Image (cartoon, rainbow, N blue to C red):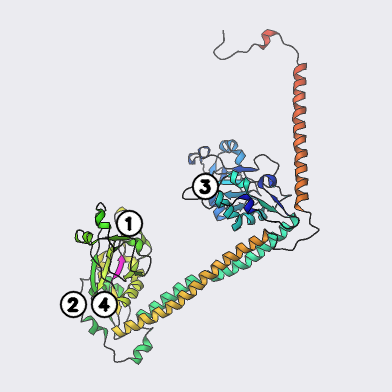
């Protein structure tokens, strides 16, 4: 945990340490957390009225987003949580420290329990300066260290009041904000430019695969190797019978012309399609082995040699799961992931699989690497044949998978295709790694800018700027004077009321009798 004394550092000349209580406006509820949840139930919401500002507006940085409202009666009861233009809203739960400055033109309303609102003294502090300050890693780390909660961080107003705040002269605040915004604008332009890289790399990889499985990638290779044995000879070595055609699957998936030495082949012809199973969870001995038991959660990489769960030989002997040899192609055939992705991988070790998966065990092991890449290439099209299953999940039927057409070149050309694809993908992976490093460096740069800003190192200081200490003292004096005037006014009002009560004429005793309900004669 970051302690306050560890957080403080030596400030630049003319700067002061302060806190939100000193920076708050001299108005009631200037620093205010949202109401308790019971005071703002969803059953209180109406179609139109006073707006409820919550995390959704702060996270999106859009105060005009959302359409939750309460009526005027509820608003009056919760008016201490009301907001106005210029107020700062801070998220308290999950994405802690996220900040939104409310602009002119907002709808009247209140904050919900997940926010804090700050109304700060404009003579002392710029809202934009505080927003940048709260976005710095220095402050985020401080708040995170003091927050509480189980699965997510939770802040509160008490914690925020402990936050030490660096206060420069007001004019220097303006220069700091302007400099930060200028540098962050340049950084954002770079980020937007490089953020196109992942999509471009994905398009590049898809183009490489498309060229490979049309035969374009190895067109020159075929010209230099005209005597290669055609793929039809290779397929004749496979003894597995061709599966029955399922609807129009094979016809629709073999929809373009291949080079003369290539051939379209059903996936189910190229190897045995094997299912999996789950040994009884009640038997501890089944789950005390060293044989990988692969399930969809493990299918996040192209190559599988180990996984989270392991089973024993006894489990295999006494359940429907089977050993899957090295070089097999694994498919997820049931699960919600099939809404958007068909995971495919190759085994680099003997494994077992659960019932939500299928394994293609190639009859010709020399084809395994090619079949991995070919299966990943056609996986996006296979997704269109996925159907709904029970309990709202998704499933890929085995007849569809077996009947899917795979473009098969001669064996030597398969190896050349694998080699070229791996070479192109390696280059793309290198560029993607450089992108990730650049993106991380940009984030570090932005935080470095903020760190320098709030240590007084980002912009030059002007000796003519009024020091923050003098500004603070003047505001304190104004507040003290206001408090004394308020006390004097209350005291004077009390004397007047007392004087009037003394001068009031005495009424006959019977005239001041009170009638209480239920006590009438």
- Judged from the image, the secondary structure of the residue bearing numbered disc 2 is loop
Identified at 23% across, 64% down, the residue is 322
* Marked residue nearer the N-terminal end (1 or 2): 2
Q: Which mark is residue 365?
A: 4
The CA distance from mark 3 to mark 1 is: 36 Å
Q: Which residue is mark 2?
A: 239
Asked if residue 30 can be seen in this view, the reply is: yes
Q: Residue 160, how many percent across, how many down?
A: 61, 47
Quarter assignment of residue 223 = bottom left
Of badges 4 and 2, the one in the foreground is 4
Q: Which residue is mark 3?
A: 148
Asked if residue 62 can be seen in this view, the reply is: no
Foreground of the two, 448 or 172: 448
The CA distance from mark 4 to mark 2 is: 14 Å
Residue range highlighted in magenta: 322-335
Foreground of the two, 477 or 248: 477
Q: Dot 1 surroundings within 10 Å: few (below 14), some, or many (20 or more)?
A: some
Q: Quadrant of the C terminus?
A: top right
Q: Dot 3 surroundings within 10 Å: few (below 14), some, or many (20 or more)?
A: some
Q: Main secondary structure of the magenta part?
A: loop
Foreground of the two, 85 or 229: 229
Of badges 2 and 3, the one in the foreground is 3
């Amino acid at each position: 945990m970051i302690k306050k004394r560890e957080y403080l550092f030596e400030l630049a000349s003319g700067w002061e340490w302060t806190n939100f209580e000193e920076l708050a406006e001299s108005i009631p509820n200037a620093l205010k957390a949202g109401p308790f949840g019971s005071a703002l139930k969803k059953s209180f919401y109406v179609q139109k009225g006073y707006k409820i500002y919550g995390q959704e507006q702060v996270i999106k940085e859009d105060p005009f987003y959302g359409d939750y409202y309460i009526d005027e009666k509820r608003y009056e009861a919760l008016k201490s949580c009301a907001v106005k233009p210029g107020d700062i809203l801070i998220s308290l739960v999950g994405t802690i420290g996220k900040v939104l400055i409310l602009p002119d033109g907002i709808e009247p309303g209140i904050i919900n329990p997940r926010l804090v609102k700050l109304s700060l003294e404009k003579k002392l502090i710029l809202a934009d300066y505080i927003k940048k300050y709260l976005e710095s890693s220095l402050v985020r780390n401080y708040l995170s260290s003091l927050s509480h909660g189980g699965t997510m961080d939770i802040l509160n107003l008490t914690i925020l009041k402990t936050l030490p705040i660096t206060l420069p002269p007001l004019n220097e605040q303006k220069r700091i904000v302007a400099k930060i915004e200028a540098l962050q604008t340049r950084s954002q332009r770079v980020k937007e430019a490089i953020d196109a890289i992942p999509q471009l790399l994905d398009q590049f990889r898809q183009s490489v695969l498309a060229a490979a499985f049309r035969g374009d990638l190895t067109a020159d290779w075929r010209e230099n190797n005209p005597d290669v044995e055609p793929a039809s000879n290779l397929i004749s070595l496979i003894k597995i019978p061709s599966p029955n055609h399922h609807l129009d699957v094979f016809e629709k998936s073999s929809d373009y012309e291949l080079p003369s030495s290539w051939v379209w082949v059903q996936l189910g012809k190229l190897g045995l399609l094997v299912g999996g199973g789950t040994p009884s969870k009640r038997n501890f001995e089944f789950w005390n082995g060293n044989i990988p038991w692969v399930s969809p959660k493990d299918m996040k990489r192209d190559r599988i040699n180990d996984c989270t769960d392991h089973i024993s030989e006894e489990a295999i002997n006494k359940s429907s799961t089977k050993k899957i040899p090295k070089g097999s192609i694994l498919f997820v055939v049931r699960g919600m992931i099939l809404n958007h992705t068909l995971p495919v991988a190759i085994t680099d070790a003997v494994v077992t699989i659960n019932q939500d998966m299928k394994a293609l065990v190639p009859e010709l092991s020399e084809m395994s690497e090619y079949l991995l890449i070919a299966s990943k290439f056609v996986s996006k099209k296979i997704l269109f044949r996925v159907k709904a299953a029970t309990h709202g999940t998704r499933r890929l039927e085995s007849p569809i998978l077996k009947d899917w057409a795979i473009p098969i070149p001669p064996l030597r050309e398969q190896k050349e295709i694998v080699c070229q694809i791996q070479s192109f993908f390696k280059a793309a992976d290198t560029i993607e790694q450089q992108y990730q490093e650049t993106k991380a460096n940009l984030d570090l740069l932005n935080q470095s800018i903020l760190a320098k800003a709030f240590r007084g190192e980002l912009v030059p200081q002007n000796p003519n700027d009024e020091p923050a200490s003098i500004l603070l003292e003047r505001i304190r004096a104004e507040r003290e004077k206001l408090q004394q005037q308020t006390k004097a006014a209350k005291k004077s009002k009390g004397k007047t009321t007392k004087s009037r009560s003394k001068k009031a004429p005495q009424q006959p005793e019977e005239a001041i009798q009170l009638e209480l309900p239920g006590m009438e004669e």
